[in-house]
Amino acid sequence: MPGLELPLVLIAILAGTLAVTSAGRGAWVAIAILALTSSALEFSVTDPNRIGLILRLSAIGIGLVAALPENLFEREALRRDLALRTLVRTLLEHPVVVASAIAGLLLGLVPLALPIESSSDALRAAGVALLVVGLPPLLTSRFIEATTRAAVVTLAGTMLLRTSIFGALDPLTSLAIGAGFTCILVVGGSVATRISNAEEER
Amino acid sequence: MTEVEALAAIRALFPMLMALSSLALVPLIRLWRGPLRDDAATYATFGVQLLLLITAVGAGLAGAGYLSTLKIGQIAIDPSEPGRLLVLLGGIVFAVIVGAGEGRRAGTMGQIALFGIAAIDLALAIPSGIAPISLLLFASLGISGAAASGKDDVGRARAVFRDLRTVSLLLPAVVIAEILRTAISYAAVDASYATPASLAAGTALGVSLVLIVAAGVFPFHGRLIKIFEALPIVGSLLVGVWIPSALALIVMSELSVLASGITDPLGGAIVPGILLAGAATLVFGAVSALLHDDIGEIVGFIAVGNAGWLALAAAAALQSPTDTSSRLIVLPGILTISLFGLWLVSVRRRYGTTSISELGGWARRTGANGIALVAAIIALAALPPGAVLAARLNLLLLGGNPLIALFAFIGQILLIVAAIRLLLVGFTPESQTVHEAETRPFANIITVSLVAGSIFVAAAAAGWLALESGGTGPLPPAPSVSPGASFEPAPSSEPSVEPTPSATVSPSVVPSGSGEISPAP
């Protein structure tokens, strides 16, 4: 899949950046796109044994269904939130995150200072860029939904970085990591709901 | 699937099968008793307790061995000695705790316990790579989310949120450690790169960080305290003690392999840093336990003290990889804190308060709770002196720093003093709350199980009771983060990655031969 790798890497980084900078619909759609692209990068779609890819996509799909907020698919609102102008404005409002993503991409293209040089440059770049974008909000954000999305971005970046060196995960580890994605999304969604319910009651 | 393969799958996945069967059993019991009947919850609790005990007995009988190795493609799931021992004891401990907790959600807590010990068993059965650690981290997150559900409590939700952040941060640390670990074999033959010792130091730092943060070692103790404050006791024990201890077994195994594979001393201040963190955690946990007046927080700080021992054990695994003392203290620590948890849930259930000022005379009013706390104190002190106490003293000696050893010793003494203070409160004049509380007759199944369970667990924790998980062959040790089959390092340059001599986690368990992963037949 060498021809598709670069576009998928760019889409994954852009989706990761939007997932941590947008709010509401834009961010959740970006998370879904990030999940699709990073899974396709991690488990080559041309590989005849697609169990890892199927497990990952199923796990993230279940997690997203459980975590997505209500009224996400209102057609008019979705069209407004996903308009190109809105997305560009969101990115322009967060220049530090965009700069971090670009810096991460460039940093990732430089080989690691380790005696393992067989790694894939594109995957490594995507992994480092997503880590650089996801870690700061994961450490500092006080908003539960934003932290959940940042956790997904960080985990996707970590797995891409690992894949760039060790190759695709074995089915068992893939199952464990897939369960982790689901767990983060479900628990994050449930905590957000519970806190907002408690605050409403108060 | 042949009959032999089916048998192997059942043996390998026995605790998980029991946990999954609870998903059917509890709704069936509720259907049988009717959702509006008051006794539906009681019967569901009995059902789950029975499953916990069956899991324990099953782990004891089936154990592990060649026949229980389940092969799925290239992956082997081979129940490990520590895993099966934790299941054996966990089934009994949580059955008693769920019984003492009673209440509408006791059945759900039992199910959470079943899944928790099944996840620990499965994680310790996977030979290598990031799967075991990620499985434990995500199980911790899932359990805290499940334990906190059922009530819109902001405190609980925030504790889970903190756990989500922690777990998400630890996984990158594990992957970086795994990458550095792999590079060691290449650095050994190419001098232009980082030295094996420095890469090993980076790996040790990564995996130690996982242990330090997950276990709640100072200054990362806040998460553990919040967990004990906010979550129900089954969730607190699993997320705050059992899963971090299982992680500790994996980390210690990895640290031993690393240290034995490197000829030069590890770079940096990693060992002194971990030692200092361990001693500081013991002193901090003990002083905090003495200064607080809420029994939930006090038990949380005693758990922090136990995390200090885990840090000292990790440092010892790096200093002296062949010494088994570091792995010997893990199981007694788990059992001791579980006993305190059992006492806490029983007292909280009986008197409806956790404030010391309202619990005057509790031990005189409910003698069974007094027996539970005495058992916990004996387990904490590891009396009479035996293998556990010797292992703790050995850890202090292995550290090589008399000042740190003295601090840790003082911390342990203060922890015991904090626990004795709780007991003394029980013999002061009865408070209004205690006087008005309803008590059960001593000849009651819950009271009898509380007393018998406390004595059994204390005996196991203090090292009086010989415990061994059965099996047909040598049992494998805990796994390490060394990469699995997906990556094959250069054969000519591979450093020694022989597993540690023993994964013994019980003072009386005989070391399992060479400690190598059992091969498939």
Image: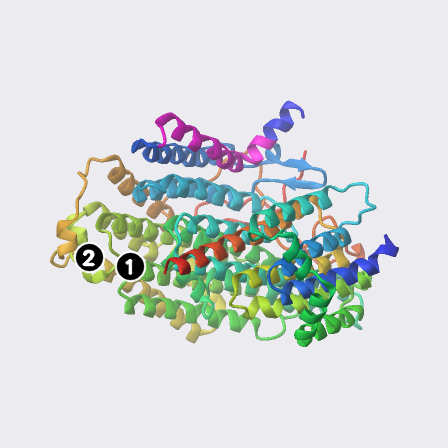
Q: Position of residue B511 (x, y in %)?
A: 52, 46
Q: Chain of mark 2?
A: B
B153 lies above or below B468: below
Q: Secondary structure at mark 2?
A: loop
Q: Earlier in the sequence, mark 2 or mark 1?
A: 1
Residue bearing mark 1: B295
Reply above or below: B444 against A11.
above
Q: What label sits on residue B359 in the rendered view?
A: 2
Q: CA distance from mark 2 to mark 1?
A: 10 Å
Name which quarter of the figure residue A155 lies in.
bottom right
Q: Is residue B239 magenta?
A: no
Residue B141: image x %, image y %? Answer: 51, 53
Are circles 2 and 1 on residues that touch, CB within 8 Å?
Answer: yes
**Amino acid at dot 2:** Leu
Residue at the (58%, 36%) spot, across then down:
B65
Q: Main secondary structure of the magenta part?
A: helix
Give the magenta range: B9-35
Q: Who's the residue at 70% across and 66% down the image?
A: A87
Residue B400 visible, this orientation: no
Count the numbered circles shown: 2
Q: Is residue B461 left or right of residue B200?
A: left
For the residue pair B347 and B144, the one nearer the viewer reads as B144
- Front position in the image: B452 or B303: B303
The residue depicted at 47 percent of the width and 67 percent of the height is: B220
Residue A192, position in %: x, y? 49, 57
